[in-house]
Amino acid sequence: MEFFDFHHHKKNVTYGIYNLDLKSKPIGSPFSIGIHPKDIDINNLENQFDWLRATISENCFAIGECGLDSFVEIDQKIQEEVFLKQIKIANEVKKPIIIHCVRKFYEVISFKKQAKQPMIIHGFNKKESIARDLLKNNFYLSFGNAVLYNLSLQNTLKITPLDKIFLETDNEDFNIKELYQKVSEIKEISLEKLNKQILENLETIKNG
């Protein structure tokens, strides 16, 4: 059984969504493309958006990572403008949006009304109350390596509906199968059922 890796940075993994680095060339397998808050170049923004638009192709599964990050030095207002512009591009090209968010969850929620496409918080590892607010606003949550050892996050996963879940390795070096096995235990369902549900979730966000 193969296990889909929703968000990864490894060119040798073909069954998943590869996060394309800024100014990189697409690979043969599904990828996401976006301007990460840390990569925003205020003196070169037009060229960054030209690259983004020119690189969106059939193999592009999603727009992202994009979003808001309180630790990045780029001014918050500029981050929000760049994020909103990417939401509008996602609306145009009908692609889901993979979101990078650090301590700006309620600001990200405020942008949900602008999006016509599904929004997925990648690498979610925050407390249950934030998860509940995101789920209430129809976000999807993608969980990573932290689920293997973080008991609080495991409890958050328990309250997250199966049809709102994705699993990812991000830039961690571990086998995605371990994560699927752990989540199947936590959710008390078979590995097969979990795998099937995540593939159904993929179809749902793909079709908007």
Image: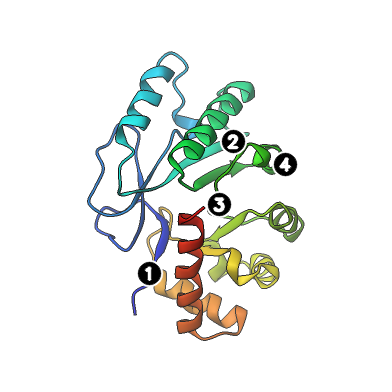
Q: Residue at x 30, y 47 (%)?
A: 58
Q: Residue at x 50, y 56 (%)?
A: 205
Mark 1 — residue? 175
In the figure, 43 relative to 169: above or below?
Answer: above
Instruction: Work out whether mark 1 precedes mark 2 in sequence or the reverse, and give the earlier one.
Output: 2
Mark 4 — residue? 106
Single out the mark in the foreground, 2 or 4.
4
Q: Which amino acid type is shown beneath numbered disc 3?
A: Ile
Q: Residue at x 68, y 66 (%)?
A: 156
Q: Which amino acid type is shown beneath numbered disc 4?
A: Tyr
Mark 3 — residue? 120
Mark 2 — residue? 69
In the figure, 33 relative to 8: above or below?
Answer: above
Q: Which amino acid type is shown beneath numbered disc 1?
A: Asn
Q: Residue at x 75, y 53 (%)?
A: 133
Residue 91 visible in the picture: yes
Counting from the top left corner in percent of width and height, residue 82 is at 53, 27
